[in-house]
Amino acid sequence: MNFEPYPFEKLHNLLEDIVPNPAYTPSVLTIGEPQFETPAFIQNTLCDNVHLLKKYPKTSGEANLREAQRAFIKKRFGVELKDEEIIPTFGTREVLFNFPQFLLFDKENPIMAFTNPFYQIYEGAAIASKAKMLLINMDESNNFKPTIDEKELSKCDLVIINFPNNPTSSVLTIQELAEWVKLSLKYNFVLLNDECYSEIYTDAKVPSLLEASKYAGNFNFKNILVINSISKRSSAPGLRSGFIAGDEIILKEYMKYRTYIGCASPIPLQNAAAIAWREEVHVEAARKIYKKNFSIAKEILGTIIPEATFYLWLKVENPLEFTKKLYEEYNVKVLPGEYLARDDSNGENPGKDFVRIALVEDEDKTRSALTRIKECLA
């Protein structure tokens, strides 16, 4: 298998010979990892359950975690799932990598489509599945929303979209998501939405593909799946708690496949995650922090406040040189957008004019870093 280096490896190679200005405190705004303490009640639950390390966890997830995740989906999206319509997972990265391999195994000359720019695990999964890749471009001309080409989509076996979007921060309405649901039924491809940023919204709640499936009249979620994670919403990426939910016919067979993978989450982590999925106060507190960071960015850089995520998709001249200069002169790391995308059929990379900035620090550190970015831009 010939995998592309990960974006952070490319960034390391870009900056490895540069000595950053020691006059500034280092600021790393490259990775989407919340730089806040995991709430104490989650940590305490984990500690209280360490004695359960002596037990093997169920591949299907413990009952209390499944119930907590279903309760979250019902409360947040108004969608009541059957137990057969959800599987707890070890985060979502493993699902995004192994689910395409499961789904496409018996397909002859499989075709997998995904949004571009993208989370690189989508590409890795396509390579591992020996699938032809179809890139669905998102750029300024379409307001960073996926362009629909029915002729191309009609050939697909699996389509992965990602809204709210990493890295562009774009959001689809329930009506726009419903159009994708209708396409998946019309052309019989599996449609999966990566919804890991659904809880990091700034004002109005953003919709789920599950809601859109019901909106489109697809009440049994045929061909429709979503994934979500606790990592961003609860500042707890180390808990590795996610789920895949939707079409129970697909999930029934996928559950069999998962019994062979050996990626069940330890019971202490599951119990701590169950508490976190049920509690909303700490999530609201986190949202206020991210919204404040966007307000600071608007004040300093003049950027708009996006509807969701904690990313700035900032357009700059010559992003690679800007990234090197910003690190060398101001000791700030950002991620060039072209590392998060691939050239399309016309040889154009939709991320080439941008850098991604993760606003995952507190107010003071964010203000300091953004002020340095403004100076570098000037």
Image (cartoon, rainbow, N blue to C red):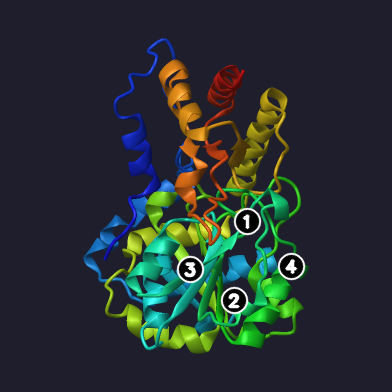
Q: How far apart are the two marked residues, 4 and 3, measured between alpha carbons?
A: 23 Å
Q: Which mark is residue 152?
A: 2
Front tag of 2 and 1: 2
Q: Quadrant of the N terminus?
A: bottom left
Q: Residue at (34%, 78%) from the top-left corner?
A: 258
Q: Residues within 10 Å of mark 2 (few under 14, many from 20)?
A: few
Disc 4 residue type (three-letter): Glu
Disc 2 vs disc 1: Cβ atoms closer than 8 Å? no
Q: How far apart are the two marked residues, 2 and 1, measured between alpha carbons?
A: 16 Å
333 vs 213, nearest the viewer:
333
Q: Residue at (43%, 81%) from the top-left corner?
A: 110
Q: Quadrant of residue 179?
A: bottom right
Disc 2 or 1, which lies upstream in sequence? Answer: 1
Q: How far apart are the two marked residues, 1 and 3, measured between alpha carbons?
A: 26 Å
Secondary structure at numbered mark 3: strand
Disc 4 or 2, which lies upstream in sequence? Answer: 2
Disc 1 or 4, which lies upstream in sequence? Answer: 1
Q: Residue at (36%, 49%) from the top-left corner?
A: 6
Total labels drawn: 4
Disc 2 residue type (three-letter): Glu
- Which residue is denoted by mark 4 in the rendering? 176
